[in-house]
Image (cartoon, grey):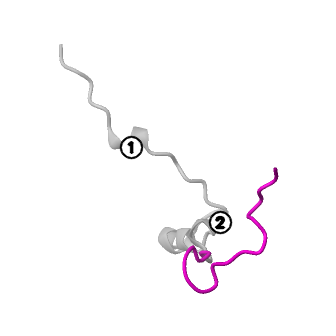
């Protein structure tokens, strides 16, 4: 008996964009979605990395 082959599409999750109905350009609609927005990374080392308060730590 031959083994069943799994396709790569079954293992991937489907992203539901928040752009409503895409009429013209699906790639541009996806790029302007909240998934690809700019994010500011916090410094971990060096200048500007010191935090006066611990990040959401309660004891």
Residue 48, picture quadrant: bottom right
Residue nearest the viewer, comparing 3 with 23 = 3
x 26%, y 30%: residue: 5
Mark seen at residue 51: none
Residue at the farthest right position = 59
Q: Which residue is mark 1?
A: 9
The mark total stands at 2
Residue at the farthest bottom position = 47
Judge whether 19 appears above or below 16 on screen. below
Binning the other alpha carbons within 10 Å of mark 2 as few (below 14), some (14 to 19) or many (20 upward) gives few
In the image, taking residue 22 as reference, residue 20 lies left or right, namely right
Q: Nearer the viewer, mark 1 or mark 2?
A: 1
Q: Earlier in the sequence, mark 1 or mark 2?
A: 1
Could you tell me residue 18's position as x and y percent?
67, 62
Residue at the farthest top position = 1
Q: Which residue is mark 2?
A: 19
Q: CA distance from mark 1 to mark 2?
A: 23 Å
Could you tell me residue 20's position as x and y percent?
67, 63
In the image, taking residue 8 as reference, residue 18 lies left or right, namely right
Residue nearest the viewer, comparing 37 with 47 = 47
Could you tell me residue 33's position as x and y percent?
61, 69
The span picked out in magenta is 41-59
In the image, taking residue 40 as reference, residue 11 lies left or right, namely left
Prevailing secondary structure of the magenta residues: loop
Q: Is residue 56 shown in magenta? A: yes
């Amino acid at each position: 008996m031959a083994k069943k082959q799994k396709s790569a599409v079954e293992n991937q999750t489907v992203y539901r964009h928040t752009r409503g109905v895409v009429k013209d350009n699906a790639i541009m609609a996806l790029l302007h979605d909240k998934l690809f927005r700019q994010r500011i990374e916090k410094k971990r080392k060096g200048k500007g990395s010191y935090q006066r308060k611990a990040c959401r730590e309660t004891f």
